[in-house]
Amino acid sequence: MSFPAGHPVTAAPVTGIRRFVRPPGAQQGAASPLASTGRPLNWAVVATGSIARTVTADLSLLEDSVLHAVSSRSQARAAEFADRFGFAASYFDADGGPSGFEQMFADPAVDVVYIATPHAQHFDVARSALQHGKHVLCEKPLTVNAAEAAELIRIARDRNLFLMEALWTRFLPSANRAWDILASGELGTPSWVQADLGFPAPADPAARIWDPAAGGGALLDLSVYTLTWAVAALGWPDDIKASGLLNEHGVDIQNALTLHYDDGRHAQLTSSLAASGPGTATIACSAGWLRTGGGDLYNPGELHVSGPAGVRVESFDRAGTGYTYQLREVTRCIQQGLTESPAMPLEDTLRTLELLDGVRAQLGLRYANDSHADAATG
């Protein structure tokens, strides 16, 4: 697969490059991500599932965050979540009336919305938030396909609102230290990458991860992390080949992606809901190698580095569970009037979804949202 028109792949040096902008909170010696960087922001949270609970716990640690409102389809879940974290207000779906999130977005006190719904709902919820004049942080993937992402980006830019995909790995001190090491030239030129992420998910058709209507499957849930390490080390690929296995409901159980570069470099990436792997990223270079450790590659607590001076292990502490760094960047950007994060630009989100659209075409993997996009573009 080649990238579509409008995103030409250009040659670039393969050493001494830092492809992702370092967020201020991930710099060596940076202030705690919990410390205030400006005026307090009133946050609203959409959904009350496990990821919402984990991220909200980290959000509550920021000195300049105010837990203002939460919405859920269920009145009981909204009330329980609000009580647990100390939200001032809770909203829920009304019979025959507006959804809980639409009621919440009408609240003029809300500054920024964090969206933690299943993937297939991201577009509708984020669009509504932007149309109500709210800044948005949306769980990855931002949307199910590139067409939906392009529309959200258009709305956000038209309304001068902040929008960001919640790809938390991009903000972690450990990941940014890895990318600093690669850019320093200490290990020479990156040549190939291997990365994997997977776990045996119980086969439950009612679970979000197995539900085709929710955008379930290994690709959208896991592959963005393995891709992050490949792009950080090697840049955007010139071509990609994909193979995988779909279940009887059309949900991908496992996939293998091979990223090709015109100069001969490559990356081999695996994501799986069928089996566990080491959950690491390895970057092989002309003068050594780097491997993540101390946790899965999306939140590594260690870097194992082998270079001309020998082998070393660098270890990292985390503030909260690690989402604090991403939340600090969103807060900082909104406080400073930015409409996107230099460390997680919307162009990167769109380009990733274009790549995943191409992968899905190879796997024969489609979602209901694709039909919506087809109808919109007619």
Image (cartoon, grey):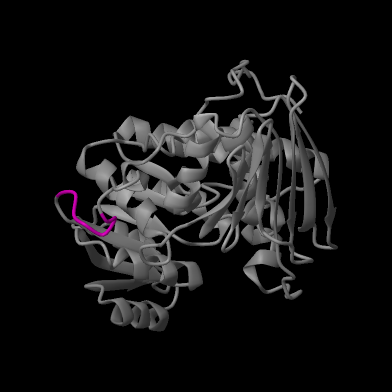
Q: Looking at the figure, which quarter contains the C terminus?
A: top right
Is residue 226 shown to the viewer in this render? yes
Residue at position x 19%, y 49% from top?
37
Q: Looking at the figure, which quarter contains the N terminus?
A: top right
Q: Quadrant location of residue 70?
A: bottom left
Please name the predominant secondary structure of the magenta segment in the image: loop
Nearer the observer, 258 or 1: 258
Q: Is residue 116 magenta?
A: no
Nearer the observer, 326 or 67: 326
Residue 118 in the image, given as x and y percentages of width and height:
55, 61
Residue that sits furthest to the front in the current view: 309
Is residue 98 shown to the viewer in this render? no
Answer above or below: position of 244 versus 274: above
Nearer the observer, 89 or 334: 334
Residue 72 in the image, given as x and y percentages of width and height:
41, 71
Task: Using residue 172 as the reference point, say whether residue 288 is left or right of it.
Answer: right
Residue at position x 38%, y 57% from top?
114
Task: Using residue 255 as the reference point, say whether residue 356 is left or right of it.
Answer: left
Residue at position x 25%, y 67% from top?
67
What is the magenta range?
A: 32-38
